[in-house]
Image: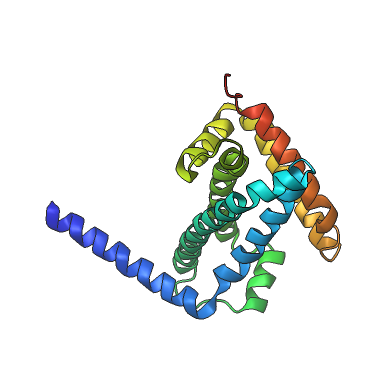
């Protein structure tokens, strides 16, 4: 039993090392997570009360909260990339499709089973990211909680209020797509609004401390 456990951990360490080396070469995850971190800093600055003293006080904590959360998202991104490769390997046993061939299949709805599975896997990871982030960052800032406790509280908030929070997630996706469709110009307006709404959602979802 002990030997089997060691082998499992060794295999996991080998896969993690391989993914980290690939990430160090490609920097795809960093290129996606770093702008997210900057965006969180800007959005939360808009979400908080417009007092320079308050922003100066919370800025150091906000920076490290963002770094921690971005690191968690990087790990989830690496796992999603591995899961995507597994899905491709299952459905494309001979050779990987090129980009034009893959887009043709998507637009013509060929290989529907693959599309359903791939979208299902993506939905699971997107739901995981939303679950751990819906109130975690405001909670860490407001109550100086650690990342793990804040993420567990965020998951609990989603479990207790699934319908309104899933609607909120759909609105975030829709607003983000709208921002991208406006050549990112709309993001400058919509993301601060989303950040401000997230802060007030946290206030409504999490029971205030008893004084």
Q: In which quarter of the image is residue 50?
A: top right
Task: Give the percent coordinates (x, y) of residue 55.
Answer: 71, 48
Q: In which quarter of the image is residue 11?
A: bottom left
Instruction: Tell whether 118 sits left or right of 191.
Output: left
- Coloration of the structure image: rainbow
Instruction: Tell whether 208 sits left or right of 86.
Output: right
Q: In which quarter of the image is residue 160?
A: top right
Q: At 67% from the left edge and 61% from the top edge, which residue is drawn? A: 38
In the image, 81 versus 104, the foreground residue is: 81
Figure check: 50 above or below 2: above
Visible residue check, residue 171 = no
In the image, 165 versus 86, the foreground residue is: 165
Task: Give the percent coordinates (x, y) of residue 114.
Answer: 55, 60
Task: Give the percent coordinates (x, y) of residue 175.
Answer: 79, 50
For the image, the number of numbered tags is: 0
In the image, 2 versus 93, the foreground residue is: 2
Q: Residue furthest top?
A: 211
Q: At 58% from the left edge and 50% from the top edge, which residue is drawn? A: 61
Q: Residue furthest front?
A: 53
The C terminus, quarter of image = top right
Q: At 52% from the left edge and 54% from the top edge, which residue is drawn? A: 68
Instruction: Tell whether 5 sits left or right of 71.
Output: left
Visible residue check, residue 132 = yes
Task: Give the percent coordinates (x, y) of residue 199.
Answer: 70, 38
């Amino acid at each position: 039993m002990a030997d089997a456990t060691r082998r499992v951990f060794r295999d996991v360490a080998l896969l993690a090392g391989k993914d980290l080396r690939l990430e160090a070469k490609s920097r795809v995850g960093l290129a996606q997570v770093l702008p997210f971190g900057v965006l969180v800093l800007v959005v939360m600055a808009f979400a908080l009360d417009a007092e320079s003293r308050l922003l100066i006080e919370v800025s150091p904590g906000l920076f490290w909260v963002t770094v921690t959360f971005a690191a968690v998202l990087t790990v989830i991104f690496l796992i999603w990339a591995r899961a995507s490769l597994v899905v491709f390997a299952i459905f494309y046993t001979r050779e990987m499709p090129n980009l034009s061939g893959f887009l043709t299949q998507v637009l013509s709805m060929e290989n529907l089973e693959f599309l359903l599975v791939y979208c299902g896997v993506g939905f699971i990871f997107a739901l995981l990211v939303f679950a751990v982030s819906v109130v975690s960052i405001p909670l860490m800032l407001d109550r100086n909680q650690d990342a793990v406790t804040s993420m567990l509280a965020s998951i609990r908030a989603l479990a207790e209020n699934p319908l309104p929070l899933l609607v909120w997630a759909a609105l975030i996706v829709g607003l983000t797509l709208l921002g991208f469709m406006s050549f990112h110009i709309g993001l400058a307006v919509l993301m601060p609004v989303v950040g401000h709404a997230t802060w007030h959602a946290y206030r409504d979802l999490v029971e205030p401390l008893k004084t």
